[in-house]
Image (cartoon, rainbow, N blue to C red):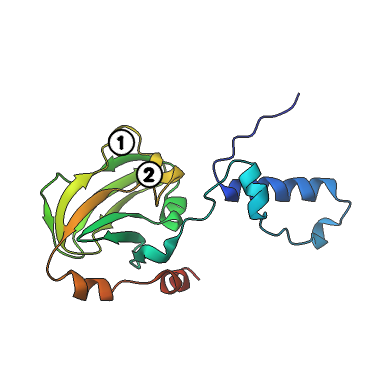
Amino acid sequence: MSQSLILKSARDATRVFSKIVQKTLPISKNKLPPVPHLPHNVLRSCGFHNSAPNYSKFLFTDSHEWIKIDGDVGTIGITNYAQEQLGDIVFCELPEVATEFSKGDIFATVESVKAASDLYIPISGEVVEVNEKLVDTPAIINESPTEDGWLVMVKLTSSADDELSELLTQTDYEKTLN
């Protein structure tokens, strides 16, 4: 009987590919060759058209929140690293629209099968929109943390420019993970 696989990400596809290579090649387990990331054309053929989000428009906190600025509104969520560390997210508590926050305030809480985690707003502002889909389906954060799994949209305050300069670029954020 064959097994069906549900691949949710490019990382899943690479892991499956790696396991297949390791099981089918007659190589000592102590000397397995490194398995490279799958080429983009292979990922596209498997249905992964956006295998790597473009983080160039994102800024990050060292507590693993991200913000993407569009005019005077910032969309905020948690990073892929954060959702991987949390595991399956089962509950998400979000603020009400029109709630005002100062940079560093707790603005939301996510709970997973492993732990609960407070989330800190990366910039001062007023909540103008909340991702209501997360109330019923918090696992969206696991499936798409930087796209469909966004948490809130915030209208930036006048101090936003100074606060934005304190956030991390993608390169700087990735250095904090090592």
Q: Which residue is mark 1?
A: 133
Q: Amino acid at mark 2?
A: Asp
Where does the image place residue 175, in percent across and percent down from the top left? Answer: 47, 73
Q: Is residue 66 left or right of residue 126?
A: right
Is tag 1's residue or tag 2's residue first in the polypeptide sequence? 1
Furthest-right residue in this view: 26
| Residue drawn at point x = 30 percent, y = 71 percent | 167
* Quadrant (top left/top right/bottom left/bottom right) for the N terminus: top right
Where does the image place residue 173, in percent across and percent down from the top left? Answer: 41, 70
Q: Is residue 93 above or below residue 83?
A: above
SS state under label 1: helix
Where does the image place residue 115, in percent across and percent down from the top left? Answer: 37, 48
Where does the image place residue 22, in percent across and percent down from the top left? Answer: 78, 50
Q: Amino acid at mark 1?
A: Lys
Q: Quadrant of residue 75?
A: bottom left
Q: Label 2 near label 1: C-beta < 8 Å?
A: yes
Instruction: Please tell me the numbered disc located at residue 26.
Output: none
Disc 2: CA contacts within 10 A as few (<14), some (14-19) or many (>=20): some
Disc 1: CA contacts within 10 A as few (<14), some (14-19) or many (>=20): some
| Residue drawn at point x = 66 percent, y = 57 percent | 37
| Residue drawn at point x = 31 percent, y = 32 percent | 136
Nearest the eye: 150 or 82: 150
| Residue drawn at point x = 45 percent, y = 43 percent | 143
Instruction: Please tell me the numbered disc located at residue 148.
Output: 2
Q: Is residue 18 above or below residue 8?
A: below
SS state under label 2: loop
